Image (cartoon, grey):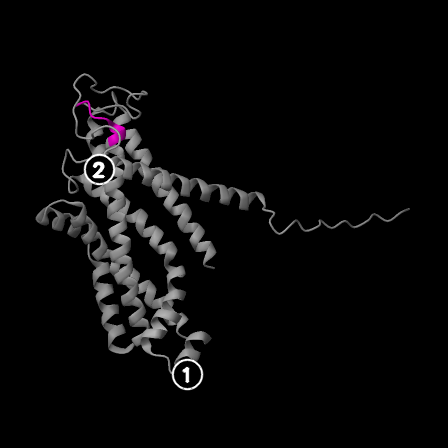
Amino acid sequence: MVAPELTLAAPGPSGARGPRARFAHTGIVLAAGWLALLTISALAAIAGAGADPLANDYEAINEPPSLAHLFGTDSLGRDIFSRSMHGAAASGLVALLTVVLGGGVGILIGVLAGLVRGAVEAFVGFVTDVTIALPSLIIVSAVVTLAGPSILTIGLIISAFTIPLFARLARAVTLSIATENHVLVARTLGASGWRILTREVLPAVLPLMMPVLMTTVAGAIVAEGALSFLGFGLRPPEPSWGALIAQGRAELSTASWLTLFPALMICITILSVNVLGEHFREASR
């Protein structure tokens, strides 16, 4: 009897992908494509392309989706697609402010606290603990009400509450990186604190913070939508995803598209941002 041969699967080419990897790659491409398309559409809407989001057309009241109005119209004949694109621009600007200001300032504070240590680290830790313990949504709502609703106001106040989160995480990452060989060698060779910060620590910290930055983008979009939904965001008739959903609640049974499309856009956008955030998290391992 001939002994059965033991067959080993030959390793595939270096570029081969398993089903899971191909699925993940497809998800990343779709997520990036959606965000790119949404960004282009929002910028085009701001530039004046498409229908006026504030224009009333009393001959097209509560029309369902059609070629003339892709997302239908509301009770005043306003184009929901155009209003959704302007709402995307509002949410995107708030998210951008949050990441640039909250992320930038928070990461810088955290890195400095992790490098300097001592009293600076203790003070930053105390401030972050106190700030994180505050009821952020209530305070944001109160400040926006007092200061007046605007994209700048909403973005600044949300950024203020993300700074402690970034500071705490960046400090923890910096404490780990500060003991690595390239930082210790730079200290031994007499490199200045500025060089160590900009050449050794920050380039190592920023890639590790990318998943948090993406999560913050999603959180800022949700926060802006929640504020508008509750009536603390942009005032009507200014378009906002949260405000569009709130305005369509009363007509949900007769004109479901008023709520459906803005809600879908929020869901798909948050999902896309989270998919990219997961990709950055896997890449940073």
Q: Residue at x 83, y 47 (%)?
A: 4
Q: Residue at x 27, y 73 (%)?
A: 121
**Camera-side residue of 216 and 54:** 54
Residues drawn in magenta:
76-82
Relative to residue 16, is residue 253 depicted above or below? above
Q: Residue at x 38, y 83 (%)?
A: 190
Residue farthest along the right direction in this orientation = 1
Q: Please give the residue where the numbered disc 1 appears in the rendered image.
A: 188
Q: Secondary structure at mark 1?
A: helix
182 lies left or right of 45:
right
Residue 22: x %, y % from top left? 54, 43
Q: Are marks 1 and 2 in contact (CB under 8 Å)?
A: no
Q: Residue at x 79, y 50 (%)?
A: 6
Can see residue 26?
yes
**Camera-side residue of 32 and 145:** 32
Tag on residue 67? none
Badge 2 crowding class, 10 Å Cα cut-off, few under 14, some 14 to 19, many 20 or more, is many
Badge 1 crowding class, 10 Å Cα cut-off, few under 14, some 14 to 19, many 20 or more, is few
Residue 226: x %, y % from top left? 23, 42
Residue farthest along the left direction in this orientation = 146
17 lies left or right of 63:
right
Relative to residue 234, is residue 207 depicted above or below? below
Q: Please give the residue where the numbered disc 2 appears in the rendered image.
A: 240
Residue 144: x %, y % from top left? 13, 48
